[in-house]
Image: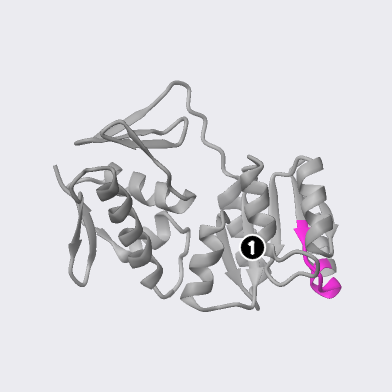
Amino acid sequence: MQKILIIEDEKGISEFLTEGLSEENYVVDTAFDGLSGLQKATQNVYDIILLDWMLPGLQGIEVTQKLRNAGIQTPIIFLTAKDTVQDTIMGLRSGANDYLKKPFSFEELLERIKVQLRKTTVEEPVILEHKAIKIDLQKRECAVNNTKLHLTQKEYDLLVFLCQNKNKVCTRDDILNKVWNIHFEYDSGVIDVYINSLRKKIKAANHQNVIDTVRGVGYIVKD
């Protein structure tokens, strides 16, 4: 059975989630502050972590950063009342895989969990290349002109999606659906921030811009 860690200081929410997820046949563990949550996440193996942003002891952002710095790549979904684009960007850049704003429906949370728990088996190394960009899909590494790019998880996923669909315009809805797994109306301004960050990192590796803007529609990578 798949195991979920809930790090949430509001016991009413924690109990509600624990009951609902247990009924869905998940094994659930809980923590009510950042420090104990971090300790459980580093000492045990979980399939996914549901993490509140505002926590006593250690903020959710700090918990995420410490886990990623320790090499723990367990999928993390933020559950938070913070709802600005900048908050979303900060959460994702810290290493979270998804971001769900409170209040949320339990059914939507279940779908988000299922998306994160899907596993793809790569039987042999797969290399995706575009001009001077080389992406190792198995190692989740990217290089430009043999210079390794240090990308966040979402920057990497976004670049892979664009390169896999080269010569095709990727609309903002396409990107939100496929990269962020968001299937409802959402402020797409977060995409612009990640595109700009990717362009800067590619340029810093002494390579020309490969991501073109299709005004009012989305983005495209061309041969």
Q: Measuring 26% from the left and 46% from the top, which residue is drawn there?
A: 165
Q: Secondary structure at mark 1?
A: helix
Q: How many marks?
A: 1
Residue nearest the viewer, comparing 110 with 165:
165
- Location of residue 197 (image quadrant): bottom left
Q: Is residue 87 magenta?
A: no
Identify whether 140 is placed above or below 104: above
- Location of residue 94 (image quadrant): bottom right
Q: Measuring 41% from the left and 52% from the top, which residue is drawn there?
A: 155
Residue nearest the viewer, comparing 121 with 58:
58
Q: Is residue 8 magenta?
A: yes
Mark 1 Cα shell of 10 Å, populated few (<14), some (14-19), many (≥20): many
| Residue designated by label 1 | 61
Image quadrant occupied by the N terminus: top right
Where in the figure is residue 167, as x and y percent of width and height? 17, 47
Q: Measuring 64% from the left and 78% from the top, which residue is drawn there?
A: 81
Where in the figure is residue 92, as x and y percent of width and height? 52, 60
| Residue closest to the far top | 124
Image quadrant occupied by the C terminus: top left
Q: Is residue 182 visible?
A: yes
Magenta residues, start to end? 6-14
| Residue closest to the far left | 223
Residue nearest the viewer, comparing 131 with 28:
131
Q: Is residue 23 visible?
A: no
Tell me the kind of residue under disc 1: Ile
